[in-house]
Image: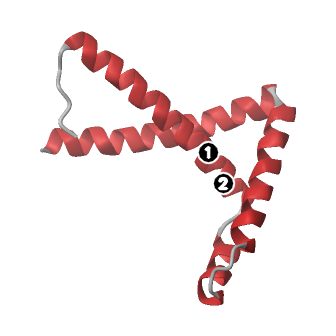
Amino acid sequence: MMQRIVLSTGNIIISLILGAMALAFVGIHYPETLDQIINVATSAKGYIVATNLPPKYNVWVRLLLEEKQLVFMFFTIVMRVVLAILQSIVFAFFGSERTA
C-alpha cells in the first residue's frame, strides 16, 4: 500500500519536474514551436471562455485559466504519458506486476 502511494506521488513530482524541463528545452532550442504552442493555448482559452457556461462558472474560468498554465499542463501531461510508457516497458522486462 505504501509503495503504491510513494510511486504515485513520485510519478507526479517527476512528471512536473520533467514537464518544466521540457518546456525550458523547447523554449530555448525551438522558440518558434513554443510560440505556436502558446498560440494554440490562447485559442483554446478563447474557445473555453466562449462556451455558454453560466456566468457563475465562466468568471472563474476566465480568472484562473491562463495560457501559461495550459502550456505547462500540456508538457506535464506529455511527460506523464512518456513516464507511463517507460514504466510499462520496465515492468514488462522485470516481470513486476503493477496493481494501480
Q: Residue furthest front?
A: 52
Quadrant hosting residue 69: bottom right
Q: Are marks 1 and 2 in contact (CB under 8 Å)?
A: yes
Choose between 16 and 51: the one closer to the eye: 51
Residue at x 64% of width, y 74% of height? 61
The residue pinned by badge 2 equals 70
The residue pinned by badge 1 equals 74
Q: Amino acid at mark 2?
A: Leu
**Against 9, is 55 above or below?**
below
Mark 1 closeness class: few <14, some 14–19, many ≥20 residues within 10 Å: some
Quadrant hosting residue 34: top right
Q: Which mark is residue 6?
A: none
Q: Quadrant of the C terminus?
A: top left
Query: Is 18 positioned to the left or the right of 83 in the image?
Result: right
Q: Quadrant of the N terminus?
A: top left
Q: Amino acid at mark 1?
A: Phe
Residue at x 63% of width, y 48% of height? 72
